[in-house]
Image (cartoon, helix red, strand yellow):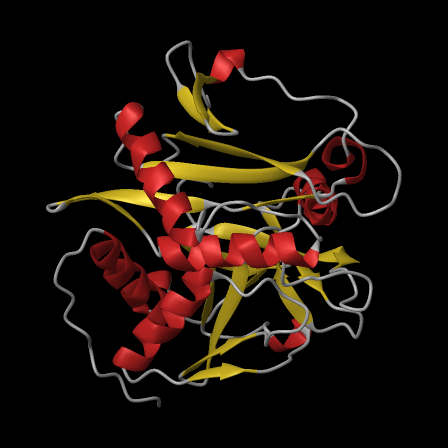
Amino acid sequence: MYYDNNTVTYYDGEWQFAKDCKAGLYQQSFHYGNGVFEGIRAYATDHGTKILRAKEHYQRLLYSAKTMHLDVDYSVDELIELTYQLLKKNNLQDAYIRPLIFTHEKLGLQAENKTHLFLCAWDWSQYFDEGQLSMKVSPYCRPDPKSCHVDAKVSGHYVNSILAMKDAHADGFDDALLVDQKGYIAEASGANFFMQKDGKLYTPPKGNILPGITRSIVMELAKANDIEVIEQHFKPEEIFGAEGAFLTGTAVEIKAIGDVDKHPFSLSWEDTFGAMLQQQFHKIVREQKVNHKKTKAA
């Protein structure tokens, strides 16, 4: 799925076939989760292949590395240039890109600052299957912000997401909605959450979430369409009876939610703000003209 014998990757200054890449087994990233990464998408446009918000993604990667005391000898511009080369070498236009920064071989719990850089990409059109998602409010909560940097994209944090997703699948749901330590909705296993209620969009504020780059694009689009977006805390029961909801993220893009804990929404997806923003998002990423609809809240 991710590579074949001809797939080219970038690893510590060299272009190598994916099948030939090797990493040591005695490093903190493997044993303790001390590594950082990004998920980035590229899209085919009439003007050539374009990486969506490349600068913002690589700024976040370097921020994540800094929070984990990991040294990175690359600038944002250098990382962007390498990524375009990666896409060209693999003849990819619509692609999912994965930069990974992981540590040198050294065990122990002292912060290890020496790192490796690995860049790879593959054709990954959809994260979820077709259709609307059925979400479960998870028994797992997001990590406490006092325990780690929850706004950084750290490899070890995703054990939390794996557990939540596994629990949701075991109960017949597609994904999980995790809460924070006070019981407020935080985010899904790997995406941000938006709810439409009373003619407005609500999304959890920063603090217990990874502030997504697609989340910020959706908020920009909403503003352009005169849709009010309110960042505030809300409990799971406040979702029940809402007009609609959706997830946002690099992998999921904008994905419709059909129900939460088997509670459906009052509007069909096609009649929600989310459906309109989804259509506009798909035009933006391919650099097509978008006609914003000035929608006043009811």
For residue 92, say whether it is visible. yes
Relative depth, front residue between 14 and 27 = 14
Q: Is residue 3 above or below residue 159?
A: above
Q: Residue at x 59, y 73 (%)?
A: 239
Q: Is residue 256 visible?
A: no
Q: Residue at x 34, y 74 (%)?
A: 220
Q: Nearer the viewer, residue 107 or 36?
A: 107
Q: Where 261 sits versus 235, above or below?
A: above
Q: Quadrant of the C terminus?
A: bottom left
* Residue 167 at x, y percent in the picture: 73, 44
Q: Position of residue 173 (x, y in %)?
A: 62, 46
**Seen in the image, is 64 located left or right of residue 256?**
right
Q: What residue appears at the point 26 percent right and 83 percent down from the top-left corner?
A: 295
Residue 96's spot in the image, x, y percent? 40, 38
> Going 75% across and 22% down the picture, which residue do you hit?
25
Left or right of 66 on screen, residue 45: left
